[in-house]
Amino acid sequence: MEVRRVENKILYITPKYPMNKTYKLLVGTILLLGLNTVSLAQKADAASPFTQFYNNNCVPEATKIGLTEAEAIQICNCTVTNLKQKYSTEAFATLYAQYRNGDNTARRTLTRYGETCSQGVLDDILWQE
């Protein structure tokens, strides 16, 4: 509905094709279900050990050693993609738990994936210029 003021009087202009109540209810329900689905997907993704590793370890550690945030994001995207190809969520959760508990083998494994990706990404950056 459009509201206009003309000479201190309020005019209500109804739309040419008003939505009926059933249509409004249907559209509202679809939007709410869609938002709920997105919310659940984000919660599930946030709980993923891959996402936790990316957010809590990979990007912060890469920026800590002097990479720009853009470089860190590129390298970590590559690293997590390669890890997802190699490990199931459950297997990676175990590896990540070992890494957080200070296991040197787990640390070397994750570092190897990161180094492989960093070499490729940094080579691409160097050869672009």
Image: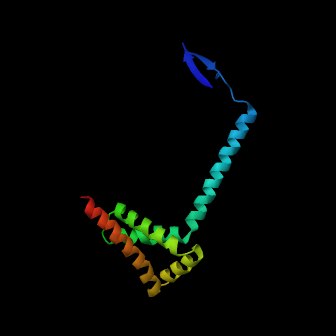
| x then y, percent, for residue 92 | 54, 76
Picture quadrant where residue 128 is located:
bottom left
Q: Which residue lies furthest to the left in this view?
A: 129
Q: Which residue is drawn at 31% across and 63% down?
A: 124
- Which image quarter holds the N terminus? top right
Q: Residue at x 72, y 40 (%)?
A: 26
Tell me if 31 is positioned left or right of 76 in this view: right
For this rendering, which residue is in front, 109 or 55? 109
Q: Which residue lies furthest to the right in this view?
A: 22
Above or below 114: residue 98: below
Above or below 54: residue 8: above
Tell me if 93 is positioned left or right of 81 in this view: right
Picture quadrant where residue 120 is located:
bottom left
Tell me if 1 is positioned left or right of 58 in this view: right
For this rendering, which residue is in front, 127 or 111? 127
Q: Residue at x 64, y 54 (%)?
A: 37
- Which image quarter holds the C terminus? bottom left
Could you tell me if residue 2 is visible in this image? yes
| x then y, percent, for residue 11 | 61, 17
